[in-house]
Amino acid sequence: MEPGDFKKWRKTLRLSQKDAANLLGLKRRMIQYYEKGERDGEKVKIPRAVRLACYAISDGVADYNGPQRKLVKLKSED
């Protein structure tokens, strides 16, 4: 996932940077680094765990507690 893809993911879901950070369990500043692709002039790679979490959130998964338990889906705002 490239920085532009990450920002597009967030915008597609209509999430603010703060909301995306809360869903991913990150600080808002990390969202900014991922979207910019750098931190203090150094390249920042989006970790696999974050990329997978983005996929899960896109699919409506809010939490996962193991294979024997039911998925917790995100609440629809419709």
Image (cartoon, helix red, strand yellow):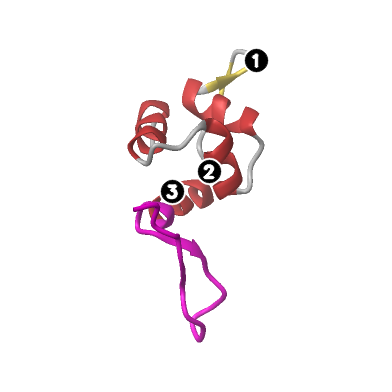
Task: Pick out the residue farthest to the top.
Answer: 41
Q: Which residue is mark 3?
A: 54
- Count of picture labels: 3
Tell me where residue 15 sits by quadrant. top left
Q: Residues within 10 Å of mark 2 (few under 14, many from 20)?
A: few
Q: Residue at x 57, y 74 (%)?
A: 65
Quick check: is 49 in the magenta stretch?
A: no
Residue type of the residue flagged with mark 1: Asp
Residue type of the residue flagged with mark 2: Pro
SS under mark 1: loop
Residue type of the residue flagged with mark 3: Cys
The answer to whether one can see residue 44 in this image is no
Does 74 sit above or below residue 31?
A: below
Which circle's residue, 2 or 1, is located before the other in the chain?
A: 1
Q: Residue at x 49, y 48 (%)?
A: 48
Q: Magenta residues, as a range?
A: 56-78
Q: Which residue is mark 2?
A: 47
